[in-house]
DNA sequence: GTCAAATATGACATTTGTGACACGATATCT
DNA sequence: AGATATCGTGTCACAAATGTCATATTTGAC
């Protein structure tokens, strides 16, 4: 759990240390005290919340770095690997999940920015995954690229259920890369 | 009885090791010394009491699970519901996952204390789930009760792979409840 | 046993909390 | 408008707490 001292916050906010202490005493900034003389510590999340609440600029070193991690969900490992190759070559970090359990857990642990999702996996209803992701706030900003050999009707249904893009198998590497890049350029 | 070294506490409090030793010397934090050179150890309860006493945040990994949440993983909804009925009647909170994705995500979001796991689910290798849970520190204290209609050999393999208990189908409600209670009584 | 990693210790450097006071901005009153 | 209070912030000095570093010793893993 990362914490900040008053001095660090003072520097980050370009303000006097004395002032930071007053913020904490006044309750504007949430912190806690060490046992000794009562030196203050502020948890990172509380500090960031404070910055946002007051419309203050967030120092770049505190912005959580935007990962380029892509989670590839496909039960056919060869296909997953081929997707991985294309994306890796383009500079993306990648991760493969070959079953639903892996997909679900990796999604929450690794927090990828994009997931490629095979619609027809054994024991896993892709539409349920879409619904699930879209209804959970903490991951709902995940981009989802549905990849499937199913007909257009199913792909349209995927789009209607929250997929950000679809790609029909078979596809060219170039198509894949283009789609991914388009999805990630906000 | 779990104890902490000064280094561990230093990390948990985001403070210097030297400072932790001073807290102990000063008596602010209750600890005891090993015979050798007097290396310090702090009992978990003393540490938590210390944190509370000084209004310091308690790291999430130390908050004792007060929840009695049980995650029921089974693709056959009727079976899952029947398990749910038994456990609910006994006062447990319950949650059902009918596919691997749900299981994986619920596991990390809801942090149940116990999971009942059907070994033979389509598209999900139960042994992989066991391995996965046991190799991830943040959830490795999860109790896993494997429920399956497979033969004893498979059940033994499950135990060897990290299951805390197994139950062969069909089973009586009483057996289920006994096993769950035994797993959760410490 | 052997060896790497963690820990205690002292001396010293740095940071922090506190009180008192000054300064500027804003609001309030006459 | 002008005078005056009020509030937030900056400055300074000092004492106390915390951090740093090097080194010897202990733990713990293999």
Image: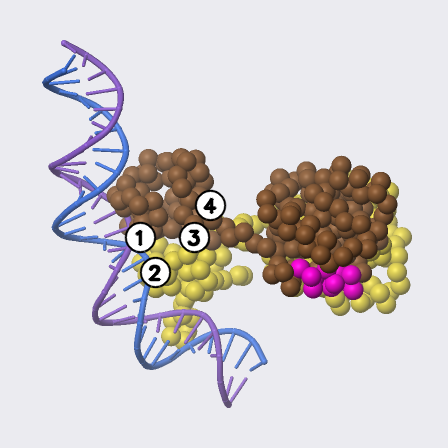
Chain colours: A brown, B yellow, C purple, D blue
Q: Nearer the viewer, mark 4 or mark 2?
A: 4
Dot 1 or dot 4, earlier in sequence: 1
Q: Nearer the viewer, mark 1 or mark 3?
A: 3
Observer-nearest of A55 and C11: A55
Using the rendered image of the protein, determine whether residue A62 is visible from the camera's viewpoint.
yes
Res. A36 mark: 1
User: How dense is the environment of label 1, judged by Cα within 10 Å: few (below 14), some, or many (20 and up)?
Assistant: few
Q: Which chain contains the residue that carries disc 3?
A: A
Q: Quadrant of residue B90?
A: top right
> How far apart are labels 1 and 3 at the CA level?
29 Å
Res. A45 mark: 4
To the question of a shared chain for discs 4 and 2, the answer is no
Q: Position of residue B12 (x, y in %)?
A: 46, 57
**Badge 4 element:** helix
Is A1 displayed left or right of A32 in the figure? right
Q: Nearer the viewer, mark 3 or mark 2?
A: 3
Which residue has dot 2 on it? Answer: B19
Q: Is residue A136 magenta?
A: no
Which residue has dot 3 on it? Answer: A61
Going 59% across and 44% down the picture, which residue do you hit? A186
Do tag 3 and tag 4 residues touch (Cβ < 8 Å)? no
* Stretch in magenta: A77-87
> How far apart are labels 3 and 2 at the CA level?
27 Å
Dot 1 or dot 3, earlier in sequence: 1
Q: Is residue A85 magenta?
A: yes
Quarter occupied by the C terminus of chain B? bottom right
Q: Quadrant of residue B167?
A: bottom right
Going 80% across and 39% down the picture, which residue do you hit? A157
Is D8 displayed left or right of B177 in the figure? left
Observer-nearest of B118 and B179: B118
Relative height, residue A110 to residue A163 (above, below): below
> How far apart are labels 1 and 4 at the CA level?
24 Å
């Amino acid at each position: 759990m990362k914490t900040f001292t008053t001095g660090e916050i003072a520097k980050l906010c370009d303000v006097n240390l004395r002032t930071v202490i007053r913020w904490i005493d006044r309750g504007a900034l949430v912190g806690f005290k060490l046992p000794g003389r009562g030196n203050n510590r502020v948890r990172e999340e509380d500090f960031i919340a404070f910055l946002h609440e007051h419309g203050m600029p967030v120092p770049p070193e505190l912005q959580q770095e935007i990962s380029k991690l892509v989670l590839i969900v496909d039960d056919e490992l060869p296909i997953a690997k081929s997707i991985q190759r294309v994306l890796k070559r383009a500079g993306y970090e990648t991760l493969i999940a070959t079953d639903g359990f892996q997909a679900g857990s990796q999604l929450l642990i690794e927090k990828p920015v994009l997931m490629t999702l095979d619609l027809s996996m054994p024991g896993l209803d892709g539409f349920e995954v879409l619904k699930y992701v879209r209804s959970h706030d903490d991951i709902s900003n995940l981009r989802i690229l549905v990849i499937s050999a199913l007909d257009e009707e199913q792909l349209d249904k995927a789009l209607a259920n929250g997929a950000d893009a679809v790609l029909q198998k078979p596809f060219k590497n170039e198509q894949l890369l283009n789609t991914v890049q388009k999805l990630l350029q906000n």
